[in-house]
Amino acid sequence: MKQDVKEYTEQKVKEMMGSFSCCAEAKEAGQRWLDALGTDKEEEETKNLMAELEEDIMPIDTLIAFASSDAGAQVFGAEKTKEVAAHAKGIKEAGGKYCDCPACAAIEAIFEKKDEILS
């Protein structure tokens, strides 16, 4: 991986990890990747990170379905869940593929350079 791509990815991983919306598994994968930078485990942890992020990013249709469900209402509250669902529908209408919370936005930015990261 080129140095500029590594630095970009490092910045985005730290953004993801520092966000309120980052799950524990993504934080752990991010930390393992950061710890592996410059070591013989870097390539392996890069692949592991990408696999974890693939599992964790929320597709916009999943967010819409969740926010429109009883489970979404329990998480967000009755009124807020309507706002989240409407916001997600707006993202989809604008051509967005994923949730735009800080963690998902950082992951999406990482995925924009995925080929360079894995090369």
Image (cartoon, rainbow, N blue to C red):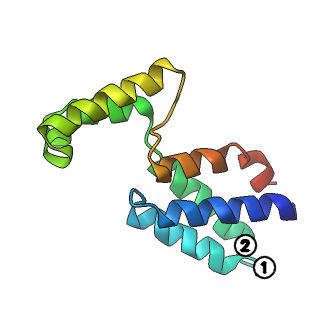
Amino acid type, label 1 = Gly
Marks 1 and 2: in contact by CB < 8 Å?
yes
On the rendered image, what quadrant is the N terminus found in?
bottom right
Provide residue 4's location: percent of width, then percent of height.
84, 60
**Callout 2 secondary element:** helix
Residue 1 in view, yes or no: no
Residue at which label 2 appears: 42
- 68 w.r.t. 80: above or below: above
Provide residue 74's location: percent of width, then percent of height.
13, 45
Question: Residue lying furthest top in this view?
Answer: 93
Residue at which label 1 appears: 38
Rendered residue at 47%/18% (across/down): 93
Rendered residue at 72%/76% (across/down): 37
Amino acid type, label 2 = Glu
On the rendered image, what quadrant is the C terminus found in?
bottom right
| Quadrant hosting residue 24 | bottom left
- 71 w.r.t. 5: above or below: above
Provide residue 41's location: percent of width, then percent of height.
71, 77
Rendered residue at 68%/68% (across/down): 44
**Callout 1 secondary element:** loop
